[in-house]
Image (cartoon, grey):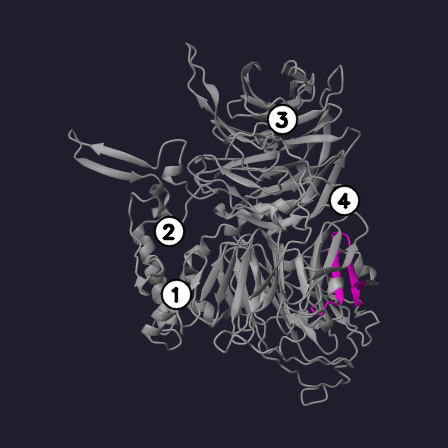
Amino acid sequence: MDIHRCRFVPYTLSAINALAFSHPSNPTAPSKGPPDLRLAIGRANGDIEIWNPLKGAWCQESILRGGKDRSIEGLVWIQDPEETDRHGYKIPGRLRLFSIGYSTAVTEWDLASGRPLRHSAANYGEIWCMAAQPKGRAPKKTANEDQEQTAEEEESQTQSVAVGCADGAIVLLNTADNDLRFTRILARPAKKKSRVLSITFQNRHTIIAGHADSTIRIYDIRNAQQVRNMTLGAGPRNGPKETLVWSVKCLNDGTIVSGDSTGTVSFWDGKNYTLLQRIHSHEADILEIAVSADGQSVFSGGMDRRTTLYRQTAGGGSAGRHRWAEVTHRRMHKHDVKAMATFETRTISVLVSGGLDASPIVVPIKEFGRENHRALSYLPQRPVIKCAPRRRLMMSWWDREVSIWTILRHGEKGTEREMSPESVGPQGRKLVAKVVLKGDESITSADLSTDGSILAVSTMAELKLFRLRRKVDSLRVLKVDLSSEMAKTGAKSIHFSPDERWLAVIRFDDAVQLYRIKQSKSPKQYPQNLHKAVNLTRLARGITKRKNRLESLGNYNRHISHIAFSADSRILAVADISGHLDTWVLEGHEDLMQEDDETPNGAQSSSSSADDSDSESDEEEHTTVIFGQHWIRNPAASLLIKLPAAPLILSFRPSTTHTTNALTNGSRGVHPTRHAPHPHSHDLPAGEDRLFVLTAENQMYEFNVLSGKMSDWSRRNPTSSLPREFRDLRDRAMGAVWDVQKQNERIWLYGVNWLWMFDLSRDLPALEEQVTKPPILNSEGGTNQLKRKREDHEDDAFAQRPRHDTGAGSKVRNSEQNLGIGRKVRKIGGAEAEGVQLLRLDREQSPTSDEEDGFALANESALVHLRRNGGKEDGKSDDEQLDNREASANDHNRVVRRAGKDRPPYWHTFKYRPILGIVPLEGETDDEEEDDAGEGSPRGIEVALVERPLWDVDLPPQYYGNQEWNP
């Protein structure tokens, strides 16, 4: 594979200003945590990212797009009270997300559509901070329960939202009855209007607010009275007179913790409201504080890039009061730390922090010092890069801007193309077009047709289409007029079919629509877009008792995340984040002379009535026929299984053969009659229908869509056959590129820092071979078979086992630990200490025993051998299989190949910087060129790999301070 390493794409990173988990911590809960747990990340460009912790996998599910000058400065989640359905089952309350940002309004978001649901604004000042009221304990029900007790119970489960304003006011907003209403304004400071910089709830009725005048004020929301003032005193010498209280938090025992602009963390008594202790731990402002669920750990972050940990120690004196001490500090961020959030259950215990470097950092709490921290990707999960392979054009978009480049081939001369080397540039690229959209809405999706002639761009408010006309050294961009119905409705995602005849549009209500584009014969004319949408109905998905746990997310689980066309553009597939697949096929043969069926299809619902229960006969009755073709639901759509996790990659295999449709004046042609004025053929597509899917849990599947079953390769190679290194990847996959040229059947998967190739023409190594380490070629040309041994004294013993961490990074080696007790505890029993037993604390976290793992492995192995015809690959002998497996020896990202043997079934590397995206490139003469490498090594594809390392990003000046070494 030929790779163009590109770093010229100026994708602008956005700082993290707010973090919020959807549920409060509950380390005593018997379960492993709520299945609907989500993390919301608010950025300075107005985007809100929704992340799924996914048992430590951390997958970015969706992005709620913002707009111009719409920074997100605060985020909170609340959950409505539980309800009971007609069958007596309890339905969890709906999760609701609120945000603020340099305005006087509080915005509630609709997670399913990605749009603002409602706003609440009044005559108070600009909002600076926000907090959600904690839920109270529901009163115990008695036998003689009356209506008054029921109202009290409902009130205790209702949460209000408190916001702090620039004029010193604290405003309460009521969220009852699925609304957001103004309740009251608490008393303002009497002397001057001091900004409220931070706010939190000590309990359901007490608010703690940090101000910009060196004061922390306590309010009782029941009577709107100020309870107490706590002052921080005068500011530092030769500094500002007033201290800014940037953050306040409360521990579970009521203790108040504050961080201010002097770099000091203060601990206050939660009953008497007196100062207990001060610790000066930062060299600059402390911008955020986070506390653990048990109240034993406190974290602080600030402008000096430090993340500091404090823990309680036994105090001296007769009182025996506990004291707080700074345990350690680390610089995990490259710039200011502005936001922190914690979440803890029995299995997850993490602190997530973010700041100007745009990268979320996940830090372990319970296992701090025994597990590594982890940096999540600051790049979007779905690449914002598309290409037109036929014209070697690459497009990228961000905010409200679209840029298009052209890329020369390796060794190509300027006389072979219309563009000269001077116009393209010394590095073989040139910016040929740039489109800046009017308005304030950010781009949600964009796509480029395969021949580079049409550009489609969508925002939350509208859809736009542009014609790209080629000039000498640039592209001329011409706007295409669309119907008001098509243009004025926003879209989540848009996608061109490979033959450039169909434009698929996913509306914000998750309705699937198709628009037929008729290309004009003259290149100077615009494409004729049919102003009639083909509405496709998704399969009805029933709600069962087991799914009630996810009802708190509403229709968010039915949010369509991926869309794909087959190579012949006659099969369309979509997938939602719950793992459901929906497919449609295009019946009939194209006849441009046939008039369109004017029968309105308005009877079909264009709403996300994705769960519409119309019968197939009703759907057929209202089918829209265009040029003799019409879209129907795949007859085998209901046979496709539900994926166990959200899909990350959805892609059809490219076709290696060209199918020709029968002409309309041939034997398959249809003719209008009196009873059928608009006839159409019912022939189904006969091209490539294999659909490749990779889930968020690194599970790989391939389906034959038209038959509704798994492909032969997928049946012979289940997820358990994948290499352990691939299954244990922590960074999720972002995209895929196919290589089916010549004899190749390879797919290249890539994440933010890895590139992995799978050869789908070969079977993966058998399951029992993965239990042992791969053979390593020695200096004499032989192999050393090294079996995995369970050695309790080796640090790497658990590196080969399935990871069981608390949601952050991997385990720290024993030799690198510098905090807390070690992993080994020596237990000595008996008077003479004869019985000595070595215990491993980590092994207690393993959910299954070695015997259970071996039993499951044996069952999987037997099934795979049965599917592979008794363990032989396509009739090869055992010796040939062993030689093929020896050729796949991998040593530090380098494949060792033996002469005369087949290529390995997979290969990977980690040598690339943060990858923004990979797109394939091809030229007009690709099919005419001969392979110079010989018949045994078919030529690979040519791609452009776009990197976006952090050092290429322009960040504001950072605080340096003391430059002592600190990891």
86 to 334, vertically: above or below:
below
Residue situated in front as seen by the camera: 451 or 350:
451
| Mark 1 or mark 3, earlier in chain | 3
- Position in image of residue 151 (x %, y %): 61, 31
> Which stretch is magenta?
450-476
Q: In which quarter of the image is residue 634?
A: bottom right
| Mark 4 or mark 1, earlier in chain | 4
- Neighbour class for label 3 at 10 Å: few (<14), some, many (≥20)? many
Q: Which amino acid does label 4 sit on?
A: Lys
SS for callout 1: loop
SS for callout 4: loop
Q: What residue type is labelled 1?
A: Pro
115 to 879, vertically: above or below:
above
Residue 495 showing in the rendered view: yes
SS for callout 3: loop
**Which residue lies under the disc numbered 1?**
765
Q: What residue type is labelled 2?
A: Gln
SS for callout 2: loop
280 to 20, vertically: above or below:
above
Q: What residue type is labelled 3?
A: Asp
Q: Residue at x 59, y 60 (%)?
A: 575
Mark 1–mark 3 contact, CB under 8 Å? no
Q: In this view, does 797 lie to the left or right of 103?
A: left
- Position in image of residue 683 (x %, y %): 63, 80
Q: In this view, does 869 lie to the left or right of 415?
A: left
Kindly identify which numbered label has been placed on residue 285: 3
- Position in image of residue 449 (x %, y %): 71, 67
Mark 4–mark 2 contact, CB under 8 Å? no
Kindly identify which numbered label has been placed on residue 461: none
| Mark 4 or mark 2, earlier in chain | 4
**Which residue lies under the disc numbered 2?**
800
**Which residue lies under the disc numbered 4?**
68
